[in-house]
Amino acid sequence: MTDRTDPALAALAAAGFDLSGLTEEQHAVLRSLTDQELGLLTDLRGRLEEAGPEVQGHAEVAGGALF
């Protein structure tokens, strides 16, 4: 279960990360992230989601090849 009271896990959950399937050890790693690392993860997620349709389209057209 995700500890939503932890600031790092709460920030990741708010950014759309599904943390429910992670182990306690993985949660511990995420809780230990610096503010800079959290910012990087949320930025990358946002950029990947923005590019989602384009990347998904390439995967469909190219038979799953990612470029």
Image (cartoon, rainbow, N blue to C red):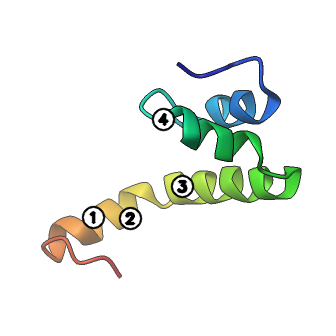
Looking at the rendered image, the disc whose residue lies closer to the viewer, 3 or 4, is: 4
Q: Which residue is mark 4?
A: 23
Image location of residue 52, percent across then percent down: 42, 56
Q: Which mark is residue 19?
A: none
Q: Which mark is residue 57?
A: 1
Image location of residue 66, percent across then percent down: 31, 76
Q: Which mark is residue 50?
A: 3
Q: Quadrant of the C terminus?
A: bottom left
Q: Judge whether 11 appears above or below 36 on screen.
A: above
Residue at the extreme left: 63
**Spatial separation of the CA atoms under disc 3 and disc 1:** 13 Å
Which quadrant of the structure image shows residue 2? Answer: top right
Describe the element under mark 3 as helix, strand or loop: helix
Marks 2 and 3: CB-CB under 8 Å?
A: no
**Spatial separation of the CA atoms under disc 2 and disc 1:** 5 Å
User: What residue is drawn where x is 24% and y is 68%?
Assistant: 59
Describe the element under mark 2 as helix, strand or loop: helix
| Residue type, mark 2 in image | Glu
| Horizontal relation, residue 38 to residue 46: left or right | right
| Horizontal relation, residue 28 to residue 36: left or right | left
Question: Which comes sooner in the sequence, label 4 or label 1?
Answer: 4
Looking at the rendered image, the disc whose residue lies closer to the viewer, 2 or 4, is: 4
Q: Judge whether 24 appears above or below 2 on screen.
A: below
